[in-house]
Image (tube, rainbow, N blue to C red):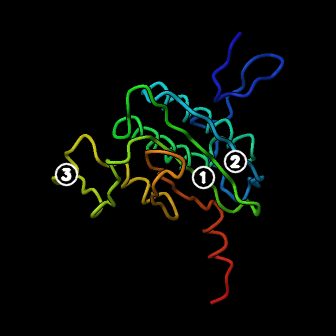
């Protein structure tokens, strides 16, 4: 019997941890441990999908369970950045690399996606996509808008070990807690 990577295994089979009746958990209920994950994937939609699934599994293993807002946000950031690497950073015969890293204090998760195409650089979104407006009618081009809204900060830099670039985003699952606990 095989299970999807998004479902933990038990001796009796798979157990679904989220669902329509499952309550959403907050980042405060999930302590995050330090970790580092890095892997190369084929520059195809299938490679991007596998990167997203493995990132979800890794986050769960690090203490950010499925069904939390932080987990879902980081997985969406991974999905958008890997999809962009496949669509805009694809060079035939070259892979893209995904790296997930949590800071030693467990307060920041950094997502890095490196591709081998240097001439196509990401542009900062000029403004929010307006529903029903000209920007809202486009079928593509909203990935970095989502990343800029979900991530605490993001950017890109040239790849240091060869041609290409690394697009990165940082997410702080506890930032809303730390700002709420600060004195005025």
Front disc: 2 or 3: 2
Query: Gap in Å between the C-alphas at discs 2 and 3?
Result: 35 Å
Give the structural element (helix, strand or loop) at label 1.
helix
Q: Earlier in the sequence, mark 3 or mark 1?
A: 1
Badge count: 3
Within 10 Å of the Cα at label 1, are there few (<14), some (14-19), or many (20+) other Cα atoms?
A: many
Looking at the image, do the residues carrying marks 3 and 1 touch, with CB atoms under 8 Å apart? no
Which of the labelled discs sits on residue 132, or is there none? 3
Front disc: 3 or 1: 1
Looking at the image, do the residues carrying marks 2 and 1 touch, with CB atoms under 8 Å apart? yes
Q: Position of residue 56 (x, y in %)?
A: 62, 38
Q: Earlier in the sequence, mark 2 or mark 1?
A: 2
In depth, the one of 163 and 62 nearer the eye is 163
Residue sitting at 45 percent across and 30 percent down? 94
Q: Position of residue 75 (x, y in %)?
A: 55, 43
Residue that numbered label 1 is attached to: 70
Q: Position of residue 54 (x, y in %)?
A: 62, 33
Residue that numbered label 2 is attached to: 64
Within 10 Å of the Cα at label 3, are there few (<14), some (14-19), or many (20+) other Cα atoms?
A: few
**131 lies left or right of 62:** left
Give the quadrant of residue 145: bottom left
Residue sitting at 76 percent across and 23 percent down? 9
- Which residue is at the far front? 162
In depth, the one of 98 and 4 nearer the eye is 98
Quarter placement of the C terminus: bottom right
């Amino acid at each position: 019997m095989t299970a999807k990577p998004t479902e933990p295994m038990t001796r009796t089979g798979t157990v679904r941890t989220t669902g329509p009746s499952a309550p959403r958990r907050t980042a405060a209920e999930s302590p995050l441990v330090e970790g580092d994950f890095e892997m190369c994937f084929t520059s195809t939609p299938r490679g991007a999908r596998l990167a997203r699934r493995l990132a979800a599994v890794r986050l769960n293993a690090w203490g950010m369970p499925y069904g939390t807002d932080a987990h879902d946000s980081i997985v969406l950031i991974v999905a958008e950045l890997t999809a962009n690497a496949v669509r805009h950073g694809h060079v035939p015969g070259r892979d893209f690399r995904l790296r997930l890293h949590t800071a030693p204090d467990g307060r920041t998760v950094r997502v890095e996606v490196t591709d081998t195409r240097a001439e196509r650089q990401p542009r900062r979104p000029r403004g929010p996509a307006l529903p029903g407006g000209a920007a809202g009618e486009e079928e593509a081009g909203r990935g970095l808008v989502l990343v800029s809204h979900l991530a605490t900060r993001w950017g890109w830099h040239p790849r240091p070990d060869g041609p290409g670039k690394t697009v990165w985003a940082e997410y702080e699952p506890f930032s809303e807690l730390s700002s709420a606990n600060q004195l005025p």
